[in-house]
Image: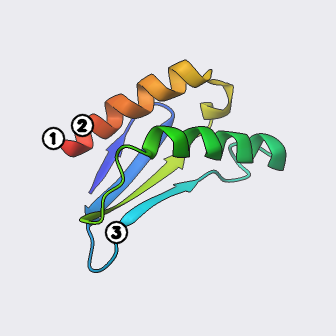
Amino acid sequence: MRAVSPHFSISYGPSPSKGGCGVVVSKKVERSSVKRHLLKRRMREVLRGYCSKDYVLIVYARPGAETLSFADLSAELSATLERVRA
């Protein structure tokens, strides 16, 4: 299943074994590896409370996500993750 917001796309489903969370930021989103890894670290921080062994959760950054402040990133990603949980 998928959930989409303007800057993120989330794939999720039941886990056949371990479960967990993953983050993907492609070079199409941000060419600089330093900025790409910063975005990944920020996304992982927001995901920390949503990871579970019962399901697999993968978050893909979409173009424009690299320009968000941490507060905006956190608010948008949290709102999208709440839709997934419901």
Residue 8 visible within the image: yes
Residue at coordinates 27% horizontally, 72% vertically from top-left? 15
Quadrant for residue 17, please give it: bottom left
Residue at coordinates 37% horizontally, 43% vertically from top-left? 49
Residue at coordinates 34% horizontally, 35% vertically from top-left? 80
Q: State left or right for residue 29 relative to residue 83.
A: right
The residue tagged 2 is 83
Does the CB distance between marks 1 and 2 fall below 8 Å?
A: yes
Q: 10 Å neighbourhood of mark 2: few (<14), some, or many (≥20)? A: few
Mark 3: amino acid: Gly
Q: Which mark is residue 86?
A: 1
How much space separates mark 3 and mark 1, taking CA atoms? Answer: 18 Å
Q: Which mark is residue 19?
A: 3
Q: In terms of depth relative to the viewer, which is nearer, 15 or 60?
A: 15
As helix, strand or loop, the secondary structure at mark 2 comes to helix
Q: Nearer the viewer, mark 3 or mark 2?
A: 3
Q: State left or right for residue 13 relative to residue 75.
A: left
